């Protein structure tokens, strides 16, 4: 098979189905997210309090359900679990059309994202089991590419559709339809080796699930490479996410308007998209921990420039666009490195559980980032959070770069052999 770079995994039928499924359903996710925001803020006039409840309903399920969904992802056929998740999410999203109260909307969003919390680790399991080892990093990058593209196209398409259809509610039906299309694509998925696996039933299943969840946590902790890499990436993303909270405040401090913030966010998304394409191929030759470290240090320097600009008010508009684009590239490098670390260094039988733990840590960061940003502003003013974030990102980034050769060597020498049976069932 000829090597055609990052697109190489798309030549494999099963990954191609997974990629198309993700592209369709993630686009629907962003359409639905925009519709929820408009319904809560414009139609119901709930403001920031209502938005905070929606954000919590999205962020808490991956944290709360991590022990359960990780075990299910490693134990159950990914085709079965992913199709079930898509059908359940289609029904729940369609129900939003008739919702008339914020508490019910939050409850439905929470239930929808419980199934999303299972779907995401199952994606990692499919990649691990269907893509050749030399292409798993590219496959993870393509998965991110689908997500980043949806982040750019989804809100723009959603705004057009809301204007065309006369409101946000019809968007929920479109979102539900994308989940049905995704489920249809995934029914054709073939993941080798799952048909012969048997799982315990009844009380033994509950006891076994608890043991397997602890085994997954123990496996992650015993591997210094995974522990430091996933933990470090989660801390880095916590500080990087403060930019989402502080962006409007920082630009206002510089005398720039809301329109400029929209342009900056768009450039951040474009930077991430370009970063995934470029760094996705580069990651096949780099140590994952080194890529995370370099990207974090790069983002830390960008934070330092922001701190200087806020203090001196010395940056023109175009420079802010460049900075936000740089943040997008840095975020792409961190996530590409994280995906490469997960796929390269995790044994097949543990991918679901390790992925679920990583998702939980990242969701916790998304919850904590706004509070951390507000707290740092209270301590030292609006320029203080970029200073702290810049220092933390540079220090962690340099440490990861320095530790990468040793941790990678130790992890490989530990002889992580692929088990004949999944540890989830043995």
Image (tube, rainbow, N blue to C red):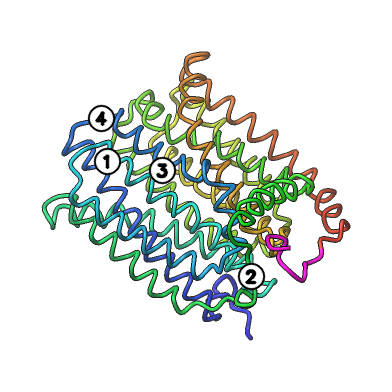
Query: Do residues under tags 3 and 4 come within 8 Å of each other at their CB atoms?
Result: no
Identify the residue position indicated by label 3 in the image. Answer: 58
Identify the residue position indicated by label 1 in the image. Answer: 104
How far apart in space, not on screen, are marks 2 and 4 (Cα)? 49 Å
Disc 1 is placed on an element classified as helix
Above or below — where is 187 with respect to 53? below
> Seen in the image, is 294 located left or right of residue 186?
right
Quadrant (top left, top right, bottom left, bottom right) of the C terminus:
bottom right
Above or below — where is 133 with respect to 214? below
Mark 1 or 4: the one toward you? 1
How crowded pointer 4 is (Cα within 10 Å; few <14, some 14-19, many 20+) is rated as few
Residue 22 coordinates in the image, percent (x, y): 44, 65
Between discs 3 and 2, the one toward the N terminus: 3
How far apart in space, not on screen, are marks 3 and 4 (Cα)? 17 Å
Disc 3 is placed on an element classified as helix
Identify the disc placed on residue 47.
4
Between discs 3 and 1, the one toward the N terminus: 3
Q: Nearer the viewer, residue 144 or 362?
A: 362
Query: Do residues under tags 3 and 2 come within 8 Å of each other at their CB atoms?
Result: no
Quadrant (top left, top right, bottom left, bottom right) of the N terminus:
bottom right
> Seen in the image, is 228 located left or right of residue 405?
left
In this picture, which residue range is highlighted in magenta?
A: 417-426
Residue 18 coordinates in the image, percent (x, y): 48, 71
Residue 41 coordinates in the image, percent (x, y): 22, 36
How crowded pointer 3 is (Cα within 10 Å; few <14, some 14-19, many 20+) is rated as many
How far apart in space, not on screen, are marks 3 and 2 (Cα)? 32 Å
Query: Do residues under tags 2 and 4 come within 8 Å of each other at their CB atoms?
Result: no
Between discs 3 and 4, the one toward the N terminus: 4
């Amino acid at each position: 098979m000829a090597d055609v770079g990052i697109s190489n995994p798309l030549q494999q039928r099963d990954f191609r189905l997974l990629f198309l499924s993700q592209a369709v359903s993630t686009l629907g996710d962003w359409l639905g997210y925009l519709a929820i925001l408009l319904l809560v803020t414009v139609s119901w006039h709930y403001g920031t309090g209502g938005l905070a409840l929606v954000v919590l309903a999205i962020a808490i399920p991956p944290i709360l359900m991590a022990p359960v969904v990780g075990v299910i992802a490693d134990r159950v056929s990914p085709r079965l679990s992913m199709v079930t998740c898509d059908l359940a999410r289609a029904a729940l999203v369609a129900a939003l059309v008739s919702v008339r109260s914020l508490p019910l909307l939050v409850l439905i969003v929470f239930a929808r994202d419980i199934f999303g919390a299972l779907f995401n680790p199952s994606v990692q399991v499919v990649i691990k089991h269907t893509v050749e080892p030399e292409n798993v990093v590219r496959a993870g990058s393509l998965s991110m590419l689908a997500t980043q593209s949806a982040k750019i196209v989804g809100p723009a398409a959603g705004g057009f559709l809301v204007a065309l259809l006369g409101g946000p509610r019809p968007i929920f039906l479109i979102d539900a339809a994308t989940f049905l299309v995704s489920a249809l694509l995934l029914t054709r998925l073939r993941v080798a080796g799952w048909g012969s696996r048997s799982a315990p039933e009844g009380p033994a299943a509950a006891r076994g699930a608890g043991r397997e969840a602890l085994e997954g946590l123990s496996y992650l902790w015993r591997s210094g490479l995974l522990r430091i890499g996933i933990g470090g990436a989660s801390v880095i993303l916590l500080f990087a996410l403060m930019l989402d909270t502080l962006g409007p405040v920082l630009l206002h401090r510089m005398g720039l308007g809301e329109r400029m913030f929209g342009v900056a966010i768009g450039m951040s998304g474009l930077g991430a998209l370009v970063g995934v394409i470029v760094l996705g191929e580069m990651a096949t030759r780099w140590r994952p921990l080194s890529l995370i470290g370099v990207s974090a240090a790069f983002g830390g320097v960008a934070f330092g420039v922001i701190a200087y600009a806020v203090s001196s008010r010395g940056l023109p508009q175009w420079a802010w666009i460049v900075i936000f684009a740089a943040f997008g590239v840095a975020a792409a490098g961190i996530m590409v490195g994280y995906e490469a670390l997960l796929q390269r260094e995790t044994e097949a039988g543990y991918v679901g559980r390790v992925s679920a733990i990583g998702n939980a840590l990242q969701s916790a960061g998304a919850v904590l980032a706004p509070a951390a940003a507000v707290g740092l502003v209270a301590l030292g003013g609006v320029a203080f959070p970029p200073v702290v974030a810049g220092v933390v990102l540079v220090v962690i980034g340099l440490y990861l770069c320095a530790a990468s050769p040793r941790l990678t060597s130790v992890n490989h020498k530990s002889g992580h052999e692929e088990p004949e049976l999944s540890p989830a069932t043995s």
